[in-house]
Image: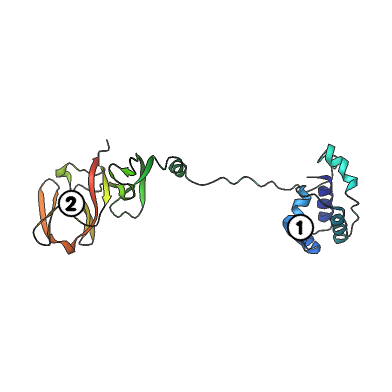
Amino acid sequence: MSRIGQEINKVRLKKGKTPKQLAKALGVSESFVLDIESGKKIVSDDMIGRISKALDFELGPIGLFASDDKFAPGIGNNDSVRPVKKVAPVVSNEPVQQVWDDAFGNILKTVPVYGYKMDRIIDKKLLPIEKNKVEGYAKEKVFYLNIEDTDMAGFRIFKGDRALGILENQIDKDGIFLIEYNEERAVRQVKKLQGDKLLLVYNRGTLITETVGTKEVKVIARLVKLEVIL
């Protein structure tokens, strides 16, 4: 804080005026007054005159404070003066993972891990991008699915494993899919039958099959690779 700024601050406080009230009397913004008091703005003799009139106190020309400000800023006035509170730097709450995403966005893909509902991300994993693809698939469609049950234990797909999934909405060939039918989501082996029929297969220790119409099933994703969590 400069000497003139200290003086203005001290007089304003003695007069019981807030920065906002002083600013209104001067026809300036509150931040302008605070900048003058903190020494961030150089105040002219004309402005000192206006402030003196607003505070009903003769501050004197700025030249009286110049030498002290130059050689000993902030020294020589031991009166009780309210210091200008320093604003702490804003610390970004941006997740560290996002910083890595930005830095390596062209070579690494942050692949989300979902449960069957896919309503929230439960984990993330970085995978390399090659020719704008991840594991040979469009990077925008890739995700991991956390296996939530033992329906596919007979296929060596166990609860807690993770399967690499590709978002798809139709079945072009037989495979393992995340589907929705009977208002529930499940992982099933799906085989195309003649006409508009599909064979759904799962195995909890006993092989179980079910034939359904294609319109009864909503295809969400095809699972292409299994990752076993030890």
Marks 1 & 2, CB-CB < 8 Å contact: no
Check disc 2 and give the amino acid type: Arg
185 or 112, nearer to the observer: 112
In the image: residue 83, left or right of residue 215? right
Position of residue 144 measured from the top left corner of the image (x, y, whole percent): 30, 46
Q: Residue at x 18, y 54 (%)?
A: 172
Quadrant of image for the C terminus: top left
Comes first in the chain, label 1 or label 2: 1
Badge 2 marks a residue whose secondary structure is strand
Q: Which residue is mark 1?
A: 19
In the image: residue 211, left or right of residue 169? left
Badge 1 marks a residue whose secondary structure is helix
Position of residue 19 measured from the top left corner of the image (x, y, whole percent): 76, 57
Position of residue 142 measured from the top left corner of the image (x, y, whole percent): 31, 47
Q: Which residue is mark 2?
A: 188
Check disc 1 and give the amino acid type: Pro
159 or 55, nearer to the observer: 55
Packing grade of label 1 (10 A; few <14, some 14-19, many >=20) is some
Position of residue 53 measured from the top left corner of the image (x, y, whole percent): 88, 60
